[in-house]
Image (cartoon, helix red, strand yellow):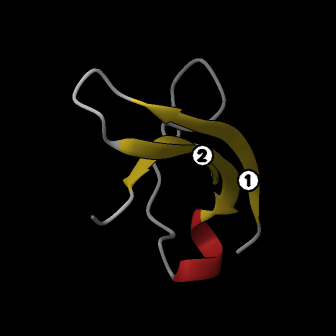
Amino acid sequence: VVFDLEFAGIQKDPWGNTKAGFIVEGKIKRSEFGLNWNAALETGGVMVSDDVKFSADIQFIKAQ
């Protein structure tokens, strides 16, 4: 699994805590993890894509 990681910066919050922010994005194929279930649709195509995209905004607080 490959992630794209972006450093969003370091900043103090209103309570004086120092925080570092990151944005993580990626894509996996369900089939590579044994998740092969799917159902054909009457209009063509399938119900669930093999590609799963994800993103997360993460903050870390510096220990004091």
Quick check: 38 left or right of 13? right
| Mark 1 nearby-residue class (10 Å; few <14, some 14–19, many ≥20) | few
The residue pinned by badge 1 equals: 5
The x, y position of residue 38, in whole percent, is: 47, 53
Number of marks in the rendered image: 2
Q: Is residue 21 above or below residue 64?
A: above
Q: Compared with residue 47, is residue 14 higher up or lower down, i.e. above or below?
A: above
Question: Could you tell whether 4 is left or right of 50 in the image?
Answer: right
Left or right placement of residue 2 versus residue 18 in this view: right
Q: On the image, which quarter does residue 17 sit in?
A: top left
Residue furthest toward the left?
15
Observer-nearest of 55 and 61: 61
Report helix, strand or loop for mark 2: strand
Quarter of the image containing the C terminus?
bottom left
> Which callout, 1 or 2, points to the residue nearer the camera?
2
Residue 34 coordinates in the image, percent (x, y): 51, 82
Question: Which is more toward the observer, 50 or 23?
Answer: 23
Up/down of 29 relative to 50, above or below: below
Q: Could you tell me if the residues under marks 1 and 2 are in contact, i.e. CB atoms within 8 Å?
A: yes
10, 39: nearer the viewer: 10
Location of residue 43 in the rendering, given as x and y in whole percent from the top left corner = 59, 17
* Residue drawn 52% across the image and 24% down it: 42
Residue ID at (61%, 72%): 31
Density class for disc 2 (Cα within 10 Å; few <14, some 14-19, many ≥20) is some
Label disc, if present, on residue 44 of the rendered structure: none
Amino acid at dot 2 = Phe
Question: Could you tell which of marks 1 and 2 lies nearer the N-terminus?
Answer: 1
Which labelled disc corresponds to residue 22?
Answer: 2
Task: From the viewer's side, name the closer residue of 58 and 33.
Answer: 58
State which quadrant residue 1 falls in.
bottom right
Considering the numbered disc 1 on the image, is that residue within a helix, a strand or a loop?
strand
**Mark 1 belongs to which amino acid?**
Leu
